[in-house]
Structures are given as structure tokens and as C-alpha cells.
Amino acid sequence: MIPSKPLAGLKVVELGTLIAGPFASRICAEFGAEVIKVESPDGGDPLRKWRKLYEGTSLWWFVQARNKRSITLNLKHEEGREVLKKLLAEADILIENFRPGVLEKLGLGWDALHALNPKLVMVRLSGFGQSGPMKDQPGFGAVGESMGGLRYITGFEDRPPVRTGISIGDSIAALWGVIGALMALRHREVNGGQGQVVDVALYEAVFAMMESMVPEFDVFGFIRERTGNIMPGITPSSIHTCADGKHIQIGANGDAIFQRFMRAIDRHDLADAPDLADNAGRDARRDELYGVIDRWAASLPLSEVEAILVRAEVPASRIYSAEDMFADPQFLAREMFLSARLPDGKPFRMPGIVPKLSDTPGGVEWTGPQLGEHNAEVLGELGYSAEDIAALKAGGAI
């Protein structure tokens, strides 16, 4: 017997577009929640057209909307809003990432929804949160990464700040949203409480990841600056280029690890140096140490560098491209690529499920649906007849 997924029985309604809201509901869907994605009838989620398109639809869409049912509702239409209220009356979680105030103008703010369904948990993802002087301003992940402190420290000291290659701020906010939703559900179910709002601001989601930034500035007035690939105070930990032009990240900043590393590259003098026995001492000589490691890595091809580091049990990794991942035995052993089919039957692979639960693992039942693919199914479950649904469509409500 196949075990049920851990979130089976939960109903989630998603009023989200692009990344933060849809990623949060995707996690819920992968672990068994019934997720109904509400989209605008005039094209739906813009993510459907982002980045690389296959026959007119984003490949990202097929991943981001997997296991979800898609319905279309015109929320500017009174009958469209009535359908949504029927959905929310029996939902456990609402996930939305509109700008604050939009749902309130539609008569769908927290007070109205809480009165409709006191057990509803409302996850609200926005640039700056539901309060404060900036709450009404638009804000994407890039803005959150900038305000939250990440962009300031990312890059090299002699150049402007740079971004990471993905919208990491949105995805971090989504994770906080899911954590908050599950905590709110636990309160509701274990403590007999009611639903509540989970308010996640993109800039705060990033800010919460900034390690020791706040106390270091408050106590010492210290402002961490951009330092490229090294981490001051944690030495050696950096990226090095091998003889064949390929790159490797080496993290030998543990005391015993550093000694093993130095012996592996025949630098016993450094392995045994008393002043290099801890991070503070190594950091004081970091330019020298990075020079030693740079020259060693540059003298050998990547495969030989990797082999030496593996034998010495030094944490390291080549800098993987997607091509590297597809052939890597660790990725394959952990089932990090799932096989699926595009609408025309073409096979493709998509990312596996994270995290791995031993008894109730997540899974993928279907890929991102067509716009409004489940209108008849979902509305039928709400008691609408075929004639009712036709009338809603003719009237512009769906």
C-alpha cells in the first residue's frame, strides 16, 4: 500500500503569480495538499510565458504548477468573486502575493475571509509586508534582496553589487510562507485555535538569512563588505581554477580538515604551523594561503584535484553546470531528476522532490495544467451545473 502524503487532506487555494506564491503552493502540492490555482481568464499566470518556451508555454511552468488544478476566475466580476468565496469557505490555506490592499478593494481582505471561514490560514507574500510606510509599494525579489542586505555583500569589492543567478529572494520568502502556514495549522489543530495571517515580506525573508550582520554592526559598528569568493574569518574557503580552466570550490576551514589538506598537497610546514591551527590564525595569513592553493590547483586538471581532495576528505565541489548534474551519480542516486512528459508526449526531466521523507515522501502526479483545465471539475464539486458554468463563462466571470 502506497502511504498517503503528509499534507493529504489539506485544501490550498493559490492566488499567486510568478514565483513566491506559486512556489509556496507547489511545495504543498508535492506533499499531498489539494492545490487549486486561481488564474485570470486573460492569459493566466505570466510565468506561463517566462524564459524558455516549448510550443508557447514556459518549461518552468510545467514544474512550478505541478500537481495543481487550474481554474480561471475574473475577480473583478461579482460572480467570479462568489466562486472564490465558495472555494475559500472550505479551504485550509490561502496563499496570495498581490500588493497589499488589492484583495481588500475586492472585498476579500482578512476580516471578510476570517468571518467567512474562521479556520482559514492566509499566507500573504509581498515586497514589504502588510504594514509600515512602504507596504503599498510594489516589490519583487530583486528589491527584497537589495533591501534585505544580500546584494550589498554579493560581488567583488572593486565592482558594483551583483545578483545571484536566480530569484533567490522570492524562493526564500516562499519557504518562510510554507513554514508559517504549517505552524499556523499546528496551532489551529493542536491548540484549538483559529486561522491567522502569515505575513511574509520579501525583504524580511532575505534579511532573516543575513547571519551575524545585525549584532556585528550594533556592537562593533562593523559593516560587512563585498569580498568576492572568500569569506573573511573563515579560511580557507574559496573557488580556484584548475589547469584545464575548470573551477572548484574548496572549503578547508575546519582545523583538522586544513591540516589534512595541507599534507595532501605536500605542505607539511603549513599543516604543522602553530599559528595556522585555528581560523583566526589562518585568516591573518589568508593571502598567502590562497596563493598556495591557487598555484596548486592551477598545476593540475580538475579530475586530479578532485581525486586528491576526496582521498584527503576535504569538502570540495566542482562548479556544476546543468550538464554536469545530469551525469552525476549523486544526483541520480538521490532521484533528483524526475521523468515526465510535455503535453505533446515529448519526454523531459524536471527537478526531484525536496526534502525526502522516509515514510510519507512527496511526489509528482502531473505537470503544470493548461489554463482553466479544471474549471468544470472544480466548479462541479462546488455544486455548479454544466449550464451554470456555461453561463459564468458567457458572462465573463470565468
Image: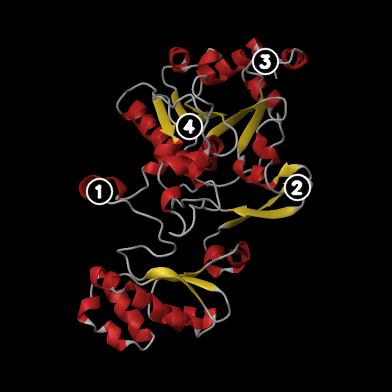
Q: Amino acid at mark 4?
A: Leu
Give residue 330's position: percent from left, percent from top.
Answer: 52, 67
Within-10-Å neighbours for mark 1: few <14, some 14–19, many 20+:
few
Is 93 rendered above or below residue 354? above
Q: In the current view of this chain or complex, which residue is farthest to the front?
A: 158
The residue where tag 4 is placed is 125
**Residue occupying the point 42% across, 49% down:** 152
Within-10-Å neighbours for mark 2: few <14, some 14–19, many 20+:
few
The residue where tag 1 is placed is 221
Q: Is residue 108 visible?
A: no
Task: In this rendered view, identify the residue nearer to me: 350 or 292.
Answer: 292
**Residue occupying the point 36% across, 34% down:** 183
**Residue occupying the point 76% across, 16% down:** 390
Marks 3 and 2, the one that precedes in the sequence: 2
- Disc 4/disc 2 C-alpha distance (Å): 29 Å
Give residue 224's position: percent from left, percent from top.
Answer: 34, 53
Tag shown at residue 121: none
Is 383 rendered above or below residue 93? above
